[in-house]
Image (cartoon, helix red, strand yellow):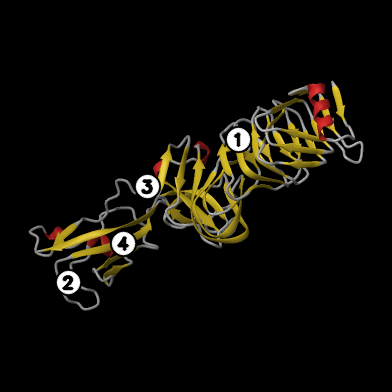
Amino acid sequence: MDMRTIGVKYGLLLAVMIFSTFCGPYCSGQITLYNTGTDGLVLTIAENEILTIQGNMENQSTINNYGTILVSGDWTNAGNFNASNGSLTLNGNSTQHFDHANQSLFQFNISGSGEKILESDLDVTGGLNLTLGILTTGSNQLQVLPNALVEGGSQESFINGALIIHGTGDKYFPIGKNDGFFPVNLFNIQGNDPVIRFELFEPNPGPQKPEELETVSSIRYWEKSLISGILENARINLSFDTSEELTEASFAVVTEAESIGGLFQNLGRSEMVGDIEDGSVTSDLSISVNANFYAIGQEIDLTGIDCIPSAFSTSATNIEDRSIKVYCSNIEAEGFSFKIYNKWGIVVYETNSVEEATTTGWNGINNNTQKIEKNDVYRYTISGRFSNGRELKKFGTITKIN
């Protein structure tokens, strides 16, 4: 390999002249910028200038970056790096190790097909852009500070590990795992200086589900940690693909839990985009303060299930139309409930008997007062389980007429 070492003890001008003469705007091989004297070497990349390093770079002195640095090999910063408003891009097509000695960058760009491995903590103050290549964080912290913009992200370029983002408003976490890109979006974050960490894990062992859901994914989950500050409100958007084994993308919902293996509560769905192969769903409810685990769920498909008529008349010619009955079949007796409420929310009819609900039903008489209810619109709820294991859960309205 072409090995190059740069080191002088005389001030800025001579240092820049020697560096420019030695390799110009393009350097190849192993480049080491080191301190040989009391002043050391100060390398400044001016605004609109580009320094391309085709190989490894080690800084043992000082770099001031107002321009653009492109590195295709390993980056080791054992000296001082003044990020200013410059950018640094890792664009190698083979594995690159990035050790920035816990110092910050203004603009950090990931391109090139090789994996990028973070070897120390890193703060990004201006922007993070993912174009091509996987950035693996390991046990190190990658933080995006307030007002920094996160862009890009795809199946070919994501953060494999944790990402920490500061601030309120809308935040984007382009994270993934095991060659899969499954980003998180938080919308309308409210609170006081929240610092939020997200990481994706596979699988999701033993999730429990509420009755209204068909499934909660055992494939993967996202973990949230509030590092500091106060998080008061935010809706969350999660991504999914065919591995989630959804039967219909339109039934996808967001779920949350306080512990792995715990009960994943339904946060609902305010918006769904895409399809089973490549889609995302946004929660209807805000994430809870105490819940830190999120997964894709699927609501029960009640399409075509019409158990309750929309109206009835106690004086109908056909005796079958003089009461409201449940017309679904194959309902399990255990856990069944059928309730009817007036417009003030008072229960006027209730039964836990499948036989009563399907053969007799409600004839318009208030169970409590034993008086006939007036003609009006009534609300109902019905819940239970079919004999094939599918859950039954519906609500709606009934109109009582003459």
> Looking at the image, is mark 1 or mark 3 earlier in the sequence?
1
Residue 11 point in image, percent of width and height:
85, 35
Establish if 326 lies above or below 1.
below
319 vs 113, left or right, is left
First in sequence: mark 4 vs mark 1: 1
The local crowd at label 4, few if under 14, some if 14 to 19, many if 20 or more residues have their Cα within 10 Å, is some
**Which amino acid type corresponds to the residue marked 4 in the rendered image?**
Thr
- Residue type at tag 3: Asp
Residue situated in front as seen by the camera: 176 or 9: 9
Q: Amino acid at mark 1?
A: Leu
- CB-based contact (under 8 Å), mark 4 and mark 1: no
Residue 132 in the image: state x and y as whole percent: 61, 30
Which residue is tagged 1? 130
- The circle on residue 373 is 2
Q: Is residue 53 above or below residue 360?
A: above
Whole-angstrom CA distance, mark 2 to mark 1, is 65 Å
The three-letter code of the residue at mark 2 reads Glu
Give the residue at mark 3: 301
Confirm or deny contact between disc 4 and disc 3 (CB under 8 A). Answer: no
